Image: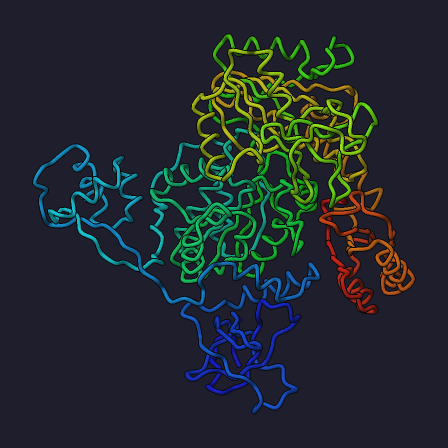
Amino acid sequence: MSADAAFAPGAPVAVLTAEPLGRPLDYRAPEGGCTPGAFVEVPLGPRRVLGVVWGPALGGFDPARLRGIARVLDVAPMREELRAFLTRAADYTLTPLPAMLRLATRAPGLFEPPGTRRIFQLGSGTPDRMTDARERVLAVLRDHGGAGFVLGELATLAGVTPQVVKGLIASGAVIEAEAPRDLPFPRLDPALPGKALSDDQAAGAEALCAAVRSGRYGTTLLKGVTGSGKTEVYLEAVAECLRLGRQALVLLPEIALTAEFLNRVEARFGARPGEWHSGVTQTERRRLWRMAGEGAVGMVVGARSALFLPFRDLGLIVVDEEHDTSYKQEEGVLYHARDMAVLRASLTSAQVVLASATPSLETWANAEAGKYARIDLTARFGASDLPEMRAIDLRAEAQEPGRWISPTLRAEVTARLARGEQAMLFLNRRGYAPVTICRACGHQIGCAHCDARLVEHRFLKRLVCHQCGDSQPIPLACPSCGAEGKLAPVGPGVERLAEEVADRFPQARVAVLSSDLFGSARALKEAIEDIAKGGADIIIGTQIVAKGHNFPLLTLVGVIDADLGLQGSDLRAAERTFQLMRQVAGRAGRAEKPGVALLQTHQPDHPVIRAILGGDEEAFWRAEAAERRAAAVPPFGRMAGIILSGPDLQPLFDLGAELARRDAPLRRIGAELYGPAPAPIARVRGRHRVRMLIKADKAAPLQTAIADWLGQLRVPNGLRVAVDIDPQSFL
């Protein structure tokens, strides 16, 4: 039976549901039959659940006893390539297939038929009294060819209150109507001219367009210094994809980036693309999911989970800032969106563009080995130049106790304020202080549910656990000894830095950008837009400020603690510090005025600090690659993390010890097993955590060996075993 053949009514078929059952279940096809990939509603016990027809029945049951599919849903069937992608991704990450399906069906209301919504359209009547506000409403409707708008959208476009729109209904100048809720998205016009490109950009754009035209799979590293115009280059590839009638997906690492990016897309193509991230309404998520399957949305901009949308004909995937750690999902299904993008594209004959100023070592090594093509943009676009980078040796600075802005950096900030320019102070630490200690007894306030210290968030007047999110009011007395007035913050966070800035620069307008200070993605977007328009003199931020934002007035970046990321034993510590510092520094001088980046450090001679300042990125990657190759660690070896968790510690060590004794399947492929050992953060949300680490040769069949190894034991009730292939975090 071909992939597109229908199953006859009553035929036994396998249906995969998102319920934690581990495998598809057999059902009878409904009246009218069904096709492979059809979304269906099936009975499961007393409930009805969403499922997908996965293929012929698995068998082993009396067909007469099979329950029937309740109904086929009115949505486009899941294409064979997406079913193959979910299967391959499940095999790679050692995730149960139902959990992968859950990622691909995270749209609300899939059971519901297409709904309607009330829209407002241009009528034939004339208002009895015309005002400027009313004229603007009618002008918007005329300019859009009489298309209907929901009330809020029309009022916003016309710059009026909803009451003005409603006031036009009585005269018939505006009429109300019911329209389908799940409307196709506006068509993006690839024929509209893009921005003028430099010679480097034009050559890069043509190479990407040729790859898209080939109709074959391929991956390209688009490496360009910050401000070199990588976005304009890959938007040309998007245009080529749209010209061919295929769909394009652009992944961004941060929701706050989407506002500026969507404006650029609208300016380039005359309409806004679909959005998929946590800041989008449930109604719009449902609409986008359905339209992706019908091919009625040409371009989607989204977070990592957008990879699992049911595109009808996906021709291009762009992973912007591909090095960003937020592309790794660290809870639930443990996957890396960059790697999954490459997998999905390979199954649908699509192109992948991995864009970054500071690519991950994995991507750099694949380009060096010839697995990926590579395009380099070596100069900033237009008049702007790369910022000058210098170190401030804190050993030589006369630093006051409890202060973190050195005299040298303070003088540079003062000079920028005098010229009406912006300065940014970067500290990758949220909150006010990372530790609260009692000066009487030495007690450090920790989380009741995790082995982590509570972080003071003075703006919120609470102590917060950054592992589980639990919080409590800042106590007046020490919870250990009861001494009052003896609790003291230790170390700086961005809120404490803001306190120092307010004291040092009382006339400056200060903006603090930290993810925990904004109640919604929209509020964060608005704050960033305000800063870009000159709404702040000094910007204080965590790593959120390093992710692609463009502040034209910003000419100085000061890194408060450049040594912070060099601590610990993470094998990627040097790489991540290098990337973060270069990205943060790249925020400076992106317009006509030159920029300067100053790194406060106690280790100006550290190899990573020297590499950041020297600017020879290729030398850094070569040196880092040589060290990793010698140690046979990623990307020149393979790793898998095994996380055992449960309510009590001893059963976890017992389970880990038993697994270590039964390591024959791992030894057969030459893998090494380390542990069990307490995780660096040994308790999270009340559950103890024990880690094991597997290290293997790059060519070793790691997943098969791990499946055989773990399959030897039944995990006791209450304990969980999580497998993290290619771990990015070792906490």
What kind of colouring is applied to the model shown?
rainbow
* 426 lies above or below 207: above
Q: Nearer the viewer, residue 401 or 658?
A: 401
Residue 380, position in %: x, y?
Answer: 53, 26
Q: Is residue 370 visible?
A: yes
Residue 206, position in %: x, y?
Answer: 47, 42
Exactly how many numbered labels are in the figure? 0
Which residue occupies the extreme right position in the image? 661
Quadrant housing residue 642: bottom right
Residue 389, position in %: x, y?
Answer: 64, 19
* 710 lies above or below 493: below
Quadrant in the picture for the C terminus: top right
Q: Nearer the viewer, residue 443 or 401?
A: 443
Q: Is residue 225 visible?
A: no
Quadrant housing residue 565: top right
* 236 lies above or below 494: below
Report whether 670 appears left or right of 647: right
Report whether 14 appears left or right of 527: right
Q: Nearer the viewer, residue 206 or 710?
A: 710
Residue 679, position in %: x, y?
Answer: 81, 46
Report whether 606 appears left or right of 55: right
